[in-house]
Amino acid sequence: MKLHQQMPELTGAKAWFNGEVTKEQLVGEKPALIHFWSASCQMCKEAMPKVNEFRDKYKDHLNVAAVHIPRSEDDLDLAKIKKTAAEHGISQPIYVDSDHSLTEAFENEYVPAYYVFDKTGQLRHFQAGGSGMAMLEKRVSRILSETEQASE
């Protein structure tokens, strides 16, 4: 995805864990973070405490959803995905993208990957890899301050 493109619709999930959300529920009142991960991705598991800390810190100002994409046959096992999510404290809604439909809509090639959308649904920041949470937080803070200024 290119910057300023609209968030794709969240359709085509094999399953949802922790509740199902729509694009309209994610953006509108608040900006949103969409986080791509995989149960077999060690870097994703290592980054998860930071993602969870980030989610909890901004829970009143930012909507967060996760997208699980399979990287192997094992990653298609819904019980394994659910177990891995629970072990790593992923409490936000999880879109299970077994057919890569949302992954293709986002043109995503990485796990972990982070997409930040403003409250109009425009992509404002993308980054991939397990590190760089400071940069992610900086970008989210900027979008949140723009959101607050616009509502004043």
Image (cartoon, rainbow, N blue to C red):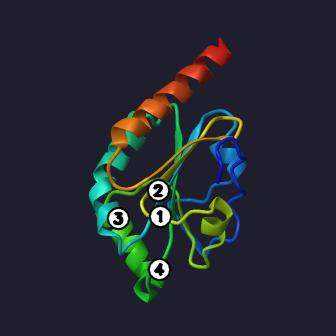
Q: How far apart are marks 4 and 2 (CA)?
A: 21 Å
- Label 1 sits on residue: 110
Q: Quadrant of residue 91?
A: bottom left
**Amino acid type at image mark 3:** Ala
- How far across and down, in percent of the image, does residue 70 sit? 48, 77
Sequence order check: which comes first, mark 4 or mark 2? 4
SS under mark 4: helix
- Label 3 sits on residue: 86
- Label 4 sits on residue: 78
* Dot 3 alpha-carbon crowd within 10 angstroms: few under 14, some 14 to 19, many 20 or more: few
- Label 2 sits on residue: 113
Which of these two is toward me, 152 or 70? Answer: 70
Sequence order check: which comes first, mark 4 or mark 1? 4
Numbered disc in front, either 3 or 1: 1
SS under mark 1: loop
Q: Which residue is drawn at 51% across and 26% down?
A: 142
**Amino acid type at image mark 2:** Ala
**Amino acid type at image mark 4:** Leu
